[in-house]
Image (cartoon, helix red, strand yellow):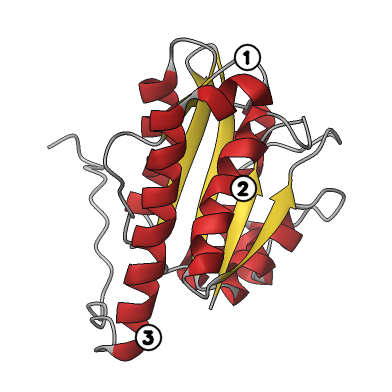
Amino acid sequence: MKVILVNGSPRKEGCTYTALMEIAGALEKQGVESEVFQLGTEPVRGCIACGKCWELGKCVFDDDRANELAAKIAAADGLVVGSPVYYSGPNGALCAMLDRVFYSSAKNFRHKPAACIVSCRRGGASAAFDRLNKYFTISQMPVVSSQYWNVVHGFTPDDVRKDLEGLQIMRTLGNNMAWLLKNIEAGNPPPAAETERMFTSFPDGK
């Protein structure tokens, strides 16, 4: 079993990474492999709503790492997305990539357990946390929870290491992810989708 840990921070080993490593350690103790996908600092395109992904099965743009990430999530058993908090929201580059990854490939993520974590110095965490969770809840991905909202606080990695409650929340999340993955592996298959997908758009204004 394998979980992809997305570090949505431009800093390779900053606060978000520190929190993700706490999850990785908990997963490892439960016999679950993890891999970090580093967003980095290269430019990321936003979705242009061209619709080509429905034809190609992937995003039409191949000049950043969105399609690489989509393939890694599809091949993995679970997903954790981490982000720093900017103006009470996740990193904009991360959201630009996730918009394209999920719009083009969410059909490949159904029933994979997922969670998000956020790192902030002081405030804005709950709004960023809520924003990221929406990718999962619209994609039929079971959301893995912890003992509190998945947040660490600190301005530096050393600060985060002093947030004992935050680190415990990360470990609990890792343990819960491993538990759910093992239960899925040993249990019943997921429910089948209804044959016809319904779309309500009210074209007549009714």
Locate residue 133 relative to residue 156 in the image: left or right: left
Amino acid type, callout 3: Glu
Question: Marks 1 and 3: in contact by CB < 8 Å?
Answer: no
> What crowding class fits label 3: few (fewer than 14 Cα within 10 Å), some (14-19), or many (20 or more)?
few
Quarter of the figure with residue 110: bottom left
Residue on which the image places disc 3: 185
Q: Which residue lies under the disc numbered 1?
A: 155
- Say which element carries label 3: helix
Q: Residue furthest left?
A: 206
Secondary structure under the numbered disc 2 in the rendered image:
helix
Estimate how packed mark 2 is, as few (under 14), some (14 to 19) or many (20 or more) residues with alpha carbons within 10 Å: many
State which tag comes first along the sequence, 2 or 1: 2
Disc 1 on helix, strand or loop? loop
Amino acid type indicated by mark 2: Met
Answer with mark 2 or mark 3, whichever residue precedes in sequence: 2
Q: Which image quadrant for residue 85?
A: top right
Q: CA distance from mark 3 to mark 1?
A: 39 Å
Q: Residue at x 61, y 76 (%)?
A: 75
Q: Is residue 196 left or right of residue 23?
A: left
Residue 21 shows which numbered tag? 2
Neighbor class of circle 1 (other Cα within 10 Å; few <14, some 14-19, many 20+) is few
Label annotation for residue 127: none
The residue closer to the viewer here, 83 or 121, is 121
Viewer-side residue, 162 vs 198: 162
Q: Residue at x 71, y 30 (%)?
A: 14
Residue drawn at 67 percent across, 69 percent down: 71
Q: Position of residue 188 (x, y in %)?
A: 24, 89
In percent of width and height, residue 90 lies at: 55, 27
Q: CA distance from mark 2 to mark 1?
A: 17 Å
